[in-house]
Image (spheres, rainbow, N blue to C red):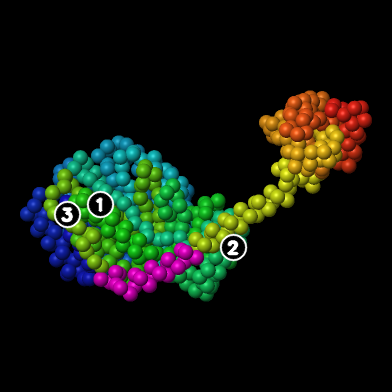
Amino acid sequence: MKQFQIAYTNDGALREGLEEIRQWRGANTSFATLFRIYSDDMNLAHIKHVCDILDEEMPDALYLGCTSHANILDGALAKAEIILSCTIFEYATTQVKLLQFPFSEENAKDVVDELKAYCDEHPWVRSVEMNATMLGMSVREFCDEMSALRSDIQVFGGGAYNPRMDEETTVVFSKGNGFSDHGIVFLLMGGDDFHTYSTLIAGWKPLTRKFRVTKADKAFLYELDGEPAFHIYQRFLKISRSDNLISNTLEFPLFMDYKGVPVLRCPLGVNDEDALMMATEVLEGTDVRIAYGDPETILSSIRHDGQKIAEFQPEVIQTFSCAARRAFWGDENVSDETVLLGSIAPTSGFYTSGEFLRMDGEMRNFNITLVLVAMREGEPKNSEIVNLYDTKLDNIESEERIPLIRRFVSFIEATTKELEESNRELEQANRKLAHTSITDGLTGLYNRAEIERGIKSSLKMQSSGALSLMMLDLDNFKKVNDIYGHGEGDRVIIALSDVLRKVLGDMDSAYTGRWGGEEFMVLLQNSDVSQAAELAEKVRVAFGSISYETAGCQTVSIGVTQARPGENSDALCTRVDKALYMAKANGKNQVVRLD
């Protein structure tokens, strides 16, 4: 595999470059020839003119391309508006095929079905590269369908873009298929001697606390934590409607975690409802945070993953870098993000509106990432492997830039961490307070106010099914306190609460609480008075079998009754209290039911 790269400046220079390629092909064994063309010149006549020259000078060559935000040539930001990278395949086993389709949310499944059918019929396909017009559309269904491609096929690519970020016009094209502003081009490559290695680099770190997506529709994010989504950018970053939103938010995208992989989503605009228009879909229920690029993390990732690419020993490296990365670094420094790769193999690509990469069999759509694809034919050549850790990037790794940004990011991270810890402590305190407000401090059962609320609520919602009350009172409890002390009395009360838990523990419909002093109340939903009486007898027997160290065995009297149709809580509680009184009057240590 051999690659030539050409920056289009004029027709003469282009023809000279094509002649050099022709001469190399004549002197070497070569087979398929493929051109990738990227243009941040939106004048389609200019792009078509370049394609016409290609058709004239090299009619057997294939080509594909798209409009871009900017281009990468020789591992650096290209100055030319139109670039061409020519890949010549040197193995007869390597095959290449171009497919182009109209592309929209409505026909995404049909497009993938045709692609899958072709791949299934042609087992030589090992990788699918794609350029797509995708601004403003949801690609979730498309990605889901692409995940069903044969498991041995790598998939990668980028979304066409416009040099002006506030413009939505984008175009893809390929040889023999023309230009499309709603299209997708697939480049199928493979064969027994064709090999690829792909990876992605992010480097953006979450800064703020988490926000929950509470309302979203396709590419529009309406609400975060119940308030208009744009408000978090107004509050945290002082971005106003009059600002160019995308130029401000590209450096501060939304961060989320998807199956352990950091996923970034970039707002492109804001509508009249203060909803954010995203580069791609964000699902309701997702937790997001505003993020910021960390130069140290980015450079560390480039060296780490770049070294793996070097060990793969590629002959060509294809890059799909988000336009946000150019905005983050600026034109002066952005090349340092990819120039290291150029020391490994010829490196080219473009700045995208979104990136695609299949990971662990699942097709994923990214923003703010750098997708790298290394390719070669045949086995590694056993040449000396470049050591990226020995290379210093003078522009980015200056003594001034990195420490300043690192300190800024560290400050925000520490502040956010402290805030999240405070929020967690506050949430725990609120949960504890809420629990304390409805429970009895001694027994841990519900308190009287909560039991009363439960009785009223159950009566109000009761439509079918019986509802019963069980009221309990410890017998001769005053003597226990007077003779053995309040400590022993507390132990007796706690013992009765434990018996109630044990006997009623498996009943989700039992609502148990301390009514006051030595009295307890149990609300039994879906239980009639007979069932309530049986449970009460189990409680009475179990409690009476307990012997205390000083107080000995104690007993409990219990009254039970069943709610009548249309009855209110006062009438029901009065009747169960009467049943309990009868149990006391009849000699205590017994259950009395009152129908």
Image x and y of residue 463, in percent: 80, 35
Q: Residues within 10 Å of mark 2 (few under 14, many from 20)?
A: some
Q: Which residue is mark 1?
A: 308
Identified by mark 2, the residue type is Pro
Q: Residues within 10 Å of mark 3 (few under 14, many from 20)?
A: few
Disc assigned to residue 475: none
Tell me where the magenta segment starts and ends, as one range.
394-415
Viewer-side label of 1, 2: 1
Occupied quadrant, residue 144: top left
Left or right: residue 226 versus residue 171 is: right
> Please, what is the dominant secondary structure of the magenta stretch?
helix
Identified by mark 3, the residue type is Ile
- Which is nearer the N-term, disc 1 or disc 2? 2
- Which is nearer the N-term, disc 1 or disc 3? 1
Identified by mark 1, the residue type is Lys
Identified at 92% across, 27% down, the residue is 586
| Mark 2, secondary structure of its residue | strand
Q: Which residue is mark 3?
A: 385
- Which is nearer the N-term, disc 3 or disc 2? 2
Dot 1 and dot 3 residues touching (CB under 8 Å): no
For marks 1 and 3, give the CA distance. Answer: 10 Å
Image x and y of residue 493, in percent: 76, 38
- Residue 519 appears anywhere in the view: no
Identified at 75% across, 26% down, the residue is 545
| Mark 1, secondary structure of its residue | helix
Q: Which residue is mark 2?
A: 228
Identified at 63% across, 55% down, the residue is 429
Q: Quadrant of the C terminus?
A: top right
